[in-house]
Amino acid sequence: MPSLPLPVPSRVAALYRFAPLPAFAALRAPLLDFCRSRGIRGTLLLAVEGINGTVAGPDEAIAALIGRLESVEGLAGLEVKYSRASSMPFHRMKVRLKKEIVTMGVPGVDPRRSVGTYVEPADWNALIADPETIVIDTRNEYEVAIGTFRGAVDPRTATFREFPGWVRARREALAGRKVAMFCTGGIRCEKATAYVKSLGITEVYHLKGGILKYLEVIPPAESLWEGECFVFDERVAVAHGLAEGEAELCRACRRPMTAADRRSERFVEGISCVRCFDERGEADRLRYAERHRQVALAERRGRGSHIGGA
């Protein structure tokens, strides 16, 4: 039997920019063709407020895409964070039109008008170690579960839409304090800090470049990060130096699992994990079991990934 080709490493680019894009819909088809013709996969979101996305592909293709995006009026100066994946971490290429490039659901929140003070990764430890600082993780509960900053508050939100309500309910407790927020790549904090400032809270900060930049530049010996950082692709998570982490996805609910989660009696490969076990009935588990069997069968036959496995 001939040997299978080795996976080809991909360059991953997580990018965003808030900028007025009144003709954003016209960008969709050209960008989709551009990426597909160069072997780029991932997702780009376009809205009247700008662009957001994560894509992967060959080095030269990713460089060409960033150059293409930077040439669009308003998109020069993209916030981009690069990392590596041992193989292609996406199944396909998508360019989607949205109302918001990160969905908070609060009209009028515009990071271009008002935003928190950016804090460089090198200065972040001192800020969050200050006892007068309240440190808030703006990500969703399933992301926080596999890693966060020491001492950070977890709002336990299921989606970013829930974050404004959580903040409003705690406005009095936050008033007069330093409020430091962080997220994966920085984009959620652009809106989160803008919203918190709109409530009259003045000392608002956020980690420039997000967790990804912090893990890239801060040595493990100096780090206040604990665990891994969830990413929205098949790598699942990254660790210090942006090395691929050990977390895996539950193929039933698509939530990340730590090594401890996988040792639980409630974890059954492709069928359930500690987080979704009580959410699913027996009919669901039978359906997931059949899907998992089909995925395994396709892999044994050498036909690549079964679509159900994605």
Image (cartoon, rainbow, N blue to C red):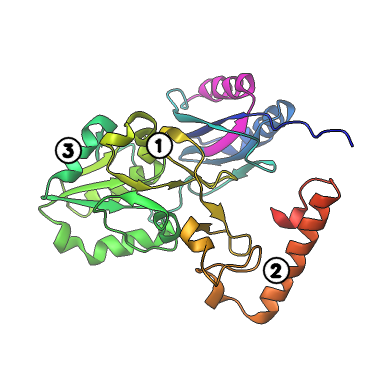
For image coordinates 69% across by 53% down, the residue present is 310
Q: Secondary structure at mark 2?
A: helix
Picture layout, residue 303 above or below residue 279? above
Q: Which residue is mark 3?
A: 126
Mark 3, residues whose alpha carbon is within 10 Å: few (<14), some, or many (≥20)?
Answer: few
| Residue 55 on the magenta span | yes
Asked if residue 141 lies left or right of residue 263, the reply is: left
Q: Nearer the viewer, residue 310 or 34?
A: 310
Q: Secondary structure at mark 3?
A: helix
Mark 2, residues whose alpha carbon is within 10 Å: few (<14), some, or many (≥20)?
Answer: some
Picture layout, residue 300 above or below residue 44? below
**What is the distance, in whole Å, between disc 1 and disc 3 at their CAs?**
19 Å
**Can you see residue 291?**
yes
**What is the distance, in whole Å, between disc 2 and disc 1 at their CAs?**
34 Å
| Residue 186 on the magenta span | no
For image coordinates 13% across by 56% down, the residue present is 175
Which amino acid is tagged 2?
A: Tyr
Q: Nearer the viewer, residue 152 or 219?
A: 219
Q: Nearer the viewer, mark 2 or mark 1?
A: 1
Q: Give the magenta-colored segment's residue range.
A: 53-73
Q: Which residue is mark 2?
A: 288
For image coordinates 80% across by 34% down, the residue present is 4
